[in-house]
Image: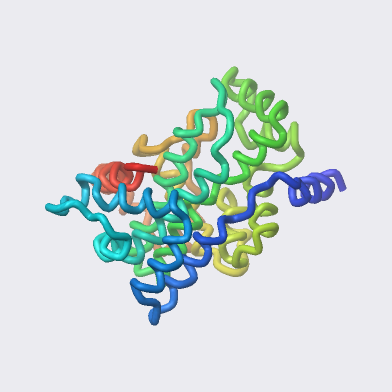
């Protein structure tokens, strides 16, 4: 009953930001093969801040274009549709939750972990031949959104949880259960329901620590779980208080990844590519 009351409280917080409308519209358009550059330009150009960010990223050294990109339609062509979708979702979410921070919560560290998990999930999804790699990015990006909700709207409880973890008294999830009677994964799942996200994304958020409980798409939850572990393993975008030192072998079975493939060479290769891709994506965001 208390858990259900917390769920109701989370979903009824008036100040919770809505998932940005433009980001959702662009994501939907990009998933439609009939969408043109002109259509995307018309939608994005209605938001001056997003337009400026897209132009800044398209002009970053990573893309190495020899002359300055000054128009949005050209920037979209340079970035490509998939990268554009990821960039807009990242920018929109970071701006929606850009709030105070203190010594117990570093917003840059948090978003770096979120982006790293999204990028890593996309990479592994492509390697495994997962049918929608863009969906993997979004699931990874949003998987820890419940931590933000806890920090901003249950701040005193968050402080108590993090202090106990850093003093070595308990793990992050165990303290969440003790203080809130729910984990950040559950809270994130409730927010995803509030946002009316697709069932498979809601599940991936809610069950990223227990992917075997997912019913709609256990592979997606398993993918986020595995990449969350990998980010901590290779030390890229790791959260100081919410570590994932081990992976669930059942997640690898769901993904069809033999455990004997997890060699040091695999970790080194994954970490190297993740650092490169993260440096690109974090530019300008």
Q: Nearer the viewer, residue 105 or 212?
A: 105
Apparent side of residue 234 relative to residue 67 in the rendered image (left or right): right
Q: Quadrant of residue 156?
A: top right
Report if residue 120 is visible in the image. no
Q: Nearer the viewer, residue 268 or 39?
A: 39
Q: Quadrant of residue 96?
A: top right
Residue 3 spot, x, y in % from top left? 80, 46
Q: Quadrant of the C terminus?
A: top left
Give me the residue at 40% from left, 37% from top.
Answer: 237
Residue 86 spot, x, y in % from top left? 41, 57
Apparent side of residue 14 relative to residue 281 in the rendered image (left or right): right
Report if residue 144 is visible in the image. yes
Q: Is 67 situated above or below 244?
A: below
Give me the residue at 72% from left, 34% from top.
Answer: 154
Q: Is 280 situated above or below 157?
A: below
Q: How is the image coloured?
A: rainbow
Apparent side of residue 106 relative to residue 198 in the rendered image (left or right): left
Apparent side of residue 144 relative to residue 131 in the rendered image (left or right): right
> In the current view of this chain or complex, which residue is farthest to the right?
1
Give me the residue at 43% from left, 55% from top.
Answer: 88
């Amino acid at each position: 009953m208390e858990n259900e009351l917390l769920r109701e409280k989370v979903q009824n917080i008036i100040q919770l930001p809505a998932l940005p409308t433009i980001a959702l519209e662009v994501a939907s358009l990009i998933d439609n093969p009939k969408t043109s550059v002109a259509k995307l330009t018309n939608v994005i150009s209605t938001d001056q801040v997003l337009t400026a960010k897209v132009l800044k990223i398209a002009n970053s050294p990573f893309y190495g274009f020899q002359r300055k990109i000054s128009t949005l339609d050209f920037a979209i062509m340079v970035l490509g549709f998939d990268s554009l979708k990821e960039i807009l979702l990242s920018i929109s979410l970071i701006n929606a939750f850009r709030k105070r921070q203190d010594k117990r919560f570093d917003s840059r560290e948090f978003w770096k972990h979120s982006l790293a998990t999204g990028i890593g999930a996309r990479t592994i999804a492509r390697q495994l031949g997962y049918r929608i790699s863009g969906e993997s990015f979004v699931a990874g990006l949003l998987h820890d959104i419940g931590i933000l909700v806890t920090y901003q709207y249950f701040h005193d409880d968050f402080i108590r949880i993090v202090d106990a973890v850093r003093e070595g008294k308990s793990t992050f999830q165990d303290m969440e259960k003790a203080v809130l009677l729910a984990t950040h994964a559950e809270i994130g799942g409730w927010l995803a329901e509030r946002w009316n996200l697709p069932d498979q994304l809601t599940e991936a958020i809610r069950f990223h620590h227990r992917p075997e409980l997912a019913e709609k798409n256990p592979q997606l939850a398993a993918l986020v779980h595995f990449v969350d572990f990998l980010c901590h393993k290779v030390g890229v975008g790791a959260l100081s208080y919410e570590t994932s030192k081990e992976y669930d072998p059942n997640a690898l079975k769901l993904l069809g990844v033999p455990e004997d493939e997890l060699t040091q060479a695999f970790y080194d290769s994954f970490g190297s590519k993740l650092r490169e891709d993260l440096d690109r994506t974090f530019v300008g965001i």
